């Protein structure tokens, strides 16, 4: 749940008057996936010289959530997501 704290902190710093409230409203609409031992073990199968650990965790999380599309800003993650069968949305590419 550290990510939740960081999102709320960032929103509060960006908008002191309403940032924390708007962050909570946004997070209420987001599916949060627990990072557990099984997820980490599954992520190992995606890691390579080109796919970093955190990218592999993102890929496994996307697949576990049942998503078919992934928004990415990183070329290597985009390539790995496409190879994993996800439709890649990459603004500016």
Image: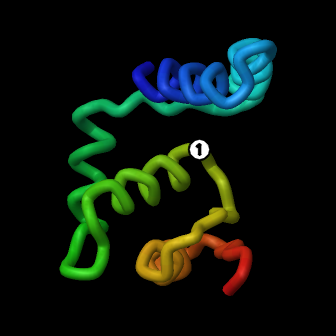
Q: Residue at x 57, y 29 (%)?
A: 10
Vertical position of residue 72 compared to residue 6: above or below? below
Query: In this orientation, does residue 57 appear?
Result: yes
The quarter of the rendered structure image containing the N terminus is top left
- Along the line of sight, which residue is nearer the eye, 53 or 23? 23
| Dot 1 crowding, Cα within 10 Å, few <14, some 14–19, many 20+ | few
The quarter of the rendered structure image containing the C terminus is bottom right
Q: Residue at x 41, y 22 (%)?
A: 2
Vertical position of residue 35 compared to residue 50: above or below? above
- Along the line of sight, which residue is nearer the eye, 46 or 13? 13
Where residue 15 appears, x then y in whole percent?
A: 73, 25
Where residue 52 appears, x then y in whole percent?
A: 27, 66
Residue 53 location, quadrant: bottom left
Q: Residue at x 59, y 44 (%)?
A: 65
Q: Which residue is mark 1?
A: 65
Q: Left of 22 or right of it: where is 45?
A: left
Vertical position of residue 79 compared to residue 77: above or below? below
Query: In this orientation, does residue 28 appear?
Result: no
Vertical position of residue 70 compared to residue 10: above or below? below
Where residue 92 appears, x then y in whole percent?
A: 72, 81
Q: Left of 56 or right of it: where is 73?
A: right
- Along the line of sight, which residue is nearer the eye, 77 or 44? 77
All told, the count of numbered labels is: 1
Q: Residue at x 30, y 73 (%)?
A: 51
Secondary-structure class at tag 1: helix
Where residue 49 appears, x then y in whole percent?
A: 19, 80
How are the colours assigned in the image?
Answer: rainbow
Residue 43 location, quadrant: bottom left
């Amino acid at each position: 749940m550290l990510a939740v704290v960081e999102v709320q902190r960032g929103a509060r710093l960006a908008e002191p008057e309403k940032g924390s409230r708007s962050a909570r409203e946004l997070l209420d609409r987001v599916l949060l996936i627990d990072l557990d031992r099984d997820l980490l073990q599954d992520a190992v199968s995606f890691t390579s010289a080109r796919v970093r650990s955190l990218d592999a965790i993102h890929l496994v999380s996307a697949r576990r959530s049942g998503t078919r599309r992934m928004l990415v800003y990183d070329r290597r993650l985009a390539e790995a997501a496409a190879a994993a069968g996800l439709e890649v949305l990459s603004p500016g590419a």
